Image (tube, rainbow, N blue to C red):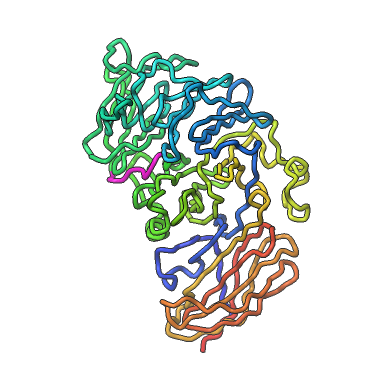
């Protein structure tokens, strides 16, 4: 009989359930595959931008100033700004002293860039010259995280005597006086009653402060096991703090991303969607158990979360077991609510923003792809400044634009889809696969390797058949054979070409 497997992108990858219990069009494994519009498609690659960095970047921030769209990147002890045509060293005269795990935080307040590593006085840059220490900042005060909110700067986990680190307030929120438009705050002195600066301890729940990100008119403050909303009152109290429902928080700095449907947060033991009304797990019974068994426990706080707006995705970037940088991204599509997977080349950080007009990715400008592999329109600029896009940094070192080329900076990568545990409503019957009929959208001549497998026991992995090459536009089916109570199928790319699997048929005989 011919069995049709439709809408192969409907459920994405599910690893937390036994494969024989999955819907027939779900997948038990994937690599470099995203799921959208009911199909499974190969991820596009990435292309290096700017000159090769002189340090490994651990923080990226897009910054508009002086008619340019700068991309600022920071190592552990140096900062640089690129506008697409030149690079400026903006390291302050007193160089930063943090390490790899002293994660940078910051942003843009009133048109001025602010950066903080938790070890030194925060720094600012206005688009020219060197970065400088934040004016009016108390010299001995340090904050683990610093974020702009409305017209103030908000610091979390405050140390007031940096020389000894003994005077630490791990539950404290500290905010500046309100800054005038185009300016930075003129005071952080909570004791000055003529200013709006203040501080408060949120110690109702004992876990440590982690990070914060605006959500609408509120700044959501994330501890390790709780969340608080900071909202402006317009009165003498300046800000109101409210404990939010739920006993979850953020795993580390940088593990929160803002999307059109709310914050997506990598929490200790979960991935949640938070829209201000309470947290909701978006990974439960899909990939949660597998994710936290895969992430390296020593380097877990090097994980981060970032959006890929062009694809309506959130990327949960993690270091896999034994890795010091992020080598895998779990991708969640907020429109289709499905998960995919993408390999990462030792990525350290990511950010979203626009590129300067001087940066182009036309065929002539990119100069890295083989003409026969290019699928974009003639002379199309894939890095158009009209669209925000995701950039990542890696230990190579490099800064890369995502979803641009067909390779990882010239290196060919493999995409793969696999499903095991297929029983076709007859788990006790032995079945024989005789052929697979894929429905693939791709350029004529694109080759996909097809394998089938079988097992007599659900606890045993399948025995795979010899691979068969399916060529788009030339091949009608893939003749491959395997038998067992539990069947399997696997599709693997053989070419440096984009492709999309919409559905497939299997010729199955029940014995």
**Number of numbered discs on residues:** 0
User: Residue 6: horizontal and vertical position, in percent?
Assistant: 56, 67
The verdict on residue 405 being magenta is no
Looking at the image, residue 186 lies above or below residue 209? above
Q: Nearer the viewer, residue 333 or 307?
A: 307
Q: Is residue 301 above or below residue 27?
A: above
Dominant SS of magenta comes to: loop
Residue 342 locus on image (x, y percent): 54, 54
Q: Residue at x 43, y 16 (%)?
A: 135
> Which residue is drawn at the image coordinates 21% and 36% (left, top)?
204
Taking the image as shown, residue 244 lies to the left or right of residue 315, namely left
Front-lying residue, 375 or 410: 410
Residue 148 image offset from top left, x and y in percent: 42, 27
Residue drawn where x is 62% and y is 37% of the image: 387
Q: Is residue 450 visible?
A: yes
Residue 178 as seen in the image, left or right of residue 347: left
The x, y position of residue 442, in whole percent, is 69, 60
Q: Residue furthest bottom?
A: 511
Does residue 248 sit above or below 424 in this rendering?
Answer: above
Position above or below: 379 against 213? below
Q: Is residue 1 visible?
A: no
Residue 251 painted magenta: yes
**Location of residue 481 by image quarter:** bottom right
**Residue 477, image quadrant:** bottom right
**Residue range (magenta):** 246-253
Q: Residue at x 33, y 41 (%)?
A: 277
Assign the N terminus to one quadrant of the image. bottom right
């Amino acid at each position: 009989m011919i069995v049709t497997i439709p809408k192969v992108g409907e459920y994405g990858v599910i690893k937390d359930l036994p494969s024989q219990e999955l819907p027939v069009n779900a997948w038990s494994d994937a690599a470099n595959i995203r799921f959208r519009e009911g199909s499974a498609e190969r991820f596009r690659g990435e292309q290096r931008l700017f000159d090769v960095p002189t340090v490994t970047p651990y923080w990226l921030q897009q910054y508009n100033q002086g008619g340019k769209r700068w991309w600022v990147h920071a190592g552990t002890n140096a900062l640089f700004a690129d506008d697409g045509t030149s690079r400026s060293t903006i390291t302050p005269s007193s160089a930063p002293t943090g390490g790899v795990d002293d994660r940078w935080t910051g942003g843009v307040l009133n048109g001025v860039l602010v950066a903080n590593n938790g070890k030194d006085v925060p720094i600012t840059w206005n688009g020219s010259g060197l970065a400088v220490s934040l004016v009016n900042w108390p010299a001995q005060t340090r904050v683990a995280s610093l974020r702009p909110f409305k017209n103030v700067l908000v610091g979390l986990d405050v140390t007031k005597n940096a020389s000894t680190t003994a005077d630490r307030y791990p539950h404290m929120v500290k905010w500046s006086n309100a800054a005038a438009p185009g300016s930075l705050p003129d005071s952080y002195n909570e004791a000055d009653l003529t200013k709006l600066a203040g501080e408060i301890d949120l110690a109702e729940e004992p876990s440590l402060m982690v990070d914060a990100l605006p959500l609408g008119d509120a700044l959501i403050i994330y501890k390790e096991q709780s969340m608080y909303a900071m909202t402006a009152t317009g009165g003498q109290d300046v800000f109101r703090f409210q404990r939010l429902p739920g006993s979850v928080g953020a795993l580390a700095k940088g593990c929160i991303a803002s999307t059109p449907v709310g914050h997506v947060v990598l929490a200790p033991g979960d991935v949640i969607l938070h829209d201000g009304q309470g947290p909701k797990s978006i990974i439960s019974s899909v990939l949660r158990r597998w994710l936290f068994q895969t992430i390296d426990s020593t380097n877990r706080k090097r994980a981060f979360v970032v959006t890929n707006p062009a694809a309506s995705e959130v990327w949960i970037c993690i270091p896999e077991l034994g890795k010091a940088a992020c080598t895998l991204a779990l991708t969640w599509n907020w429109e289709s609510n499905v998960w995919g997977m993408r390999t990462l080349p030792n990525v350290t950080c990511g950010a979203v923003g626009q590129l300067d007009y001087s940066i182009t990715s036309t065929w002539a400008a990119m100069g890295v792809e083989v003409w026969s592999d290019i699928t974009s329109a003639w002379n199309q600029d894939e890095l158009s400044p009209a669209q925000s896009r995701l950039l990542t940094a890696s230990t190579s070192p490099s800064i890369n634009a995502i979803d641009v080329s067909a390779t990882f900076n010239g290196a060919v990568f493999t995409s793969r889809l696999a499903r095991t545990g297929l029983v076709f409503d007859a788990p006790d019957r032995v079945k024989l696969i005789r052929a697979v009929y894929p429905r693939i959208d791709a350029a004529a001549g694109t080759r996909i390797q097809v394998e089938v497998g079988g097992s007599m026991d659900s606890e045993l992995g399948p025995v795979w058949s010899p691979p068969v090459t399916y060529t788009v536009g030339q091949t009608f089916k893939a003749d491959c054979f395997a038998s067992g109570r539990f069947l399997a199928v696997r599709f693997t790319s053989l070419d440096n070409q984009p492709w999309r699997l919409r559905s497939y048929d299997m010729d199955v005989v029940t014995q």
